[in-house]
Image (cartoon, rainbow, N blue to C red):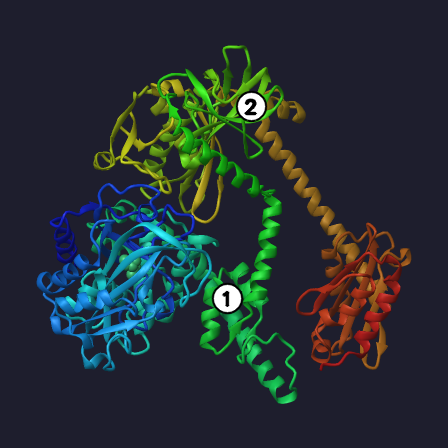
Amino acid sequence: MRTPDIRRLFLDYFRERGHQLVPSSSLVPDDPTLLLTTAGMVQFKPYFLGESSPPKDRLVSLQKCVRTVDIDNIGTTDRHSTFFEMLGNFSFGDYGKAIAVPWAYEFLTDVLGLAPERLWATVYREDDEAVELWRRVGIPIERIQRLGVAENYWDTGGPGPCGPCSEIFYDRGPAYGREGGPAVDTDRYLEVWNLVFMRYLRGEGGDENTIPFVGDLPRPCLESGLGLERVAMVLQGVDTIHDIDVMAPVMARLGQLTGADVRAEGQRRPARIVVDHVRAAAFLLADGVLPSNEGRGYVLRRLLRRAIRHGQALGVDHPFLHDLAGTVVDQLGQVWPELTERRGLVEQAMGHEEDGFGRTLAQGARLLHTAIRRTREEAVRRSSTSTTPAQPVLSARPVLSGRTAFELHDTFGFPVDLTTEIAAEAGLVVDTDRFEALMDDQRRRAQRARGEARTQGDDRGRGQAYRTILDRTGATRFVGHDRLTEEGSIIGLVRDGTEVPAALEGEHVEVVLDRTPFYAESGGQVGDAGVIRTPDGSELRVVDTGLGAGGDLHVHRAEVVRGELRVGQSVHAVVDDDRRSATARSHSATHVLHAVLRDTLGDHARQHGSLVAPGRLRFDVTHFAPIESDALVRIQDEVNQRLLSDPEVRIWQASRAEAQEAGAIALFGETYGEVVRVVDIGNFSRELCGGTHVGHGSQAGPVRLVGETSVGSGVRRIEALTGIDALRYSDHERVLVEQIAALLGVPRSGEILRRLQGRLDALARAEGELADVRQRERAKLAERLAGKGRDAGGRWIVAERLDDPGVRDGHDVKQGEEIRALVDGVLAYCPSGRPGGAVLGMVRDGKAQLVLGINSAMEQLTAPARDLLRPAGRTIGGGAGGVGRIAHAGGREVNRLDQALAQAAHHLATSTRT
Ligand code: SER
């Protein structure tokens, strides 16, 4: 039986039993406690918790899931996969296990035709009722096993609903493992279906054997998960999940691409890993996740980079992931249309990641293998010479330094898990504490650079205040799509995160109204500004509007400019018309830009975030190379042409399904209700959008693209000005050009380029001549310095100060780079065959600097250059850096430079290799 039949039979079986079909949710859950959608129940968490009501008490779904907890098992067992499709039936306070158990049994045996004598069940050890139910449907008591919390309790791994569960297993037969049921061997006894009896609320903490219960769910529920791929494996009579109908073609394609025998011992595991990871990555990309170093982007990057590494192990030497992804899309695009729709994006993103990582993989792997070898040699040496370990003891195994893992991550893009895996294969553990500490430092530096300190405590208080208001009075009604003024009343005032009954003149306060024409920031569009007045003459200046209480309240951030405001007062709210119009222009321009980008760059170009503000917009688009300036000009032209053709902007409401059917573009990361608002512009743009727009394209005015930059891998940011701001920008540029012309002394701007080119050429010539002069001077200086070379037990040594006027003789040494060149120049004078070393020092800008170099004969005799210089570096109050035969040091102790030079000279003369 093929997967399409299994899906259909399951969904029909439960629809016939009163269940409503709910579409799969995105792999990116609408739930801050979870990184990815790991089960069918995830999208229903608010129903279990009683936070909102399900459309019906019986639901059924086919959910796409990604789980990476089992990543180490992929390819090793027959049954694990990162991406899988889960079929599930759900009851919210309706039926319980007494009905779910017989249905599950009937579906497996009667509908799918599984042999009843092959079925086993496990139950939570205290669940006598479940034992009895399984027994009653026909599973004999000896094939029902009672297990503990680790096996037979289910939750999402964090706070949320949980409950005991009961799992159904299929016995694949003695060829696949030991006798004794699932308690003994879960490879032979394959888990196919899990029924969870949700009852309790789990809190933070706990582990796999202990659950921190914090309460009961409002009503007991049931949820279930039947693994489509596993059931297919049984029904299709194949040995592994990788051989089922939707996966075998991908595996076969991998065989063609690599020329490897993907079933051969040694090739099997890497091949399965590649196929598994490409599947998961394709689905994640189609749901808008892009590779990055944080969060779910990191999960994706790790999957892709693992796939690339294992692909190379199979002998591929060219980018291949996009090709395999194509086969995944061919197999599953019918069931999961987003794969087909975003095929371009999926393939491009994979190609991009492969280009980047494929290039550094070999280099990084070399570095890692050297580090592994050193660590192991070191461990052997230490264990034979000493009993006290000098490095942190994390386990009995040698420890690969956290810095190496960090450098691999930072320079070569090795996800730390990849380093850990490769190290583990060589019997090493990674000092992950040190790695994390280095990552933290880096994050803090980045955060400081962005100035992103946030006052989260205040945010929490505010959130609480909004919730209280919402519970008391209900949601704000937004009327601003139709009008810019409205009569309403104040239903809440919040100051510094706390609800207050009144606000006085001069105070800054957040105001919540029952009805408002003010658009609240969302979907990238900034919030409205304006004024709110009371009948008794008090006035508030609204500077911005946002959403509160999960989107139900419009919160006006405002200052009381006159009088006093009290909760309960009626008000007249007026939106700043100019600002709103300028924002609407940007919003319509954004949709047009989106359409033009897709037409110009290709289907992979999708909106990945935007800012729509008065007179300007910022648009992030998935694209994997810089957009060349001539392409930008063409895009800008096309946007303006389309706006000038004055297309009508038409706004209509539809059900989500209708809108999708009509081809409306939905954005990644946005959640849409059942009824959606669709914005059409002419016949070329149709998007789901809650924002405000102009009525006709020409009202958006001209658009100027003013910037194109990269924001993270695979995302380009376009910045543009709209309306009057675009015109002002052009005027400003014209003035600038006139000023440049005046500076260059050319009468007409048309001659600017020729004149400027002439000036730049002349400058380049002068710089070249200057460099020659300096080079000649440096050569003379090197010769003079070499004249001071002395013999120290057969070694030739120079140690001099460069700022000594006698030495410098007019040649002004400016930078470390130049000192290094000088050291090389001096060493060239070392009598041939003799070990030679030179150390030069100077004080510049209140800082002492030292550069030390050694020739190759010296390198054979002494410690590395950096070690030779280190004590001198310390003397001047710094460390020493550098690689190979050259090292440098700097510090503030300018008075100790002579002493430091003598020290370095001493080490040059006496150091030996340890
Ligand atoms: N949530 C359960 C599981 O994933 C059943 O759907 O196993």
Point 47% across, 77% down: residue: 426
Q: Nearer the viewer, residue 898 or 409?
A: 409
**Discs 2, 1 touching: Cβ within 8 Å:** no
Q: Nearer the viewer, residue 426 or 854?
A: 426
Point 48% across, 47% down: residue: 712
Q: In the figure, is residue 820 to the left or right of 484? A: right
- Distance (Cα) linking label 2 and label 1: 65 Å
Asked whether the viewer can see residue 624, the reply is yes
Point 48% across, 68% down: residue: 419
Q: Nearer the viewer, residue 779 or 391?
A: 391
Between circles 2 and 1, the one closer to the viewer is 2
Q: Residues within 10 Å of mark 2 (few under 14, many from 20)?
A: some
- From this view, report whether residue 489 is shown above or below residue 228: above
* Label number found at residue 363: 1
Of helix, strand and loop, which one carries label 2? strand
* Label number found at residue 508: none
Tally of marks:
2
- From this view, report whether residue 874 is shown above or below residue 398: above
Q: Position of residue 173 (x, y in %)?
A: 18, 78
Q: Nearer the viewer, residue 174 or 100?
A: 100
Amino acid on which disc 1 is placed: Gln
Quadrant where the N terminus sits is bottom left
Quadrant where the C terminus sits is bottom right
Q: Position of residue 124 (x, y in %)?
A: 29, 67
Q: In the figure, is residue 852 to the left or right of 487? A: right
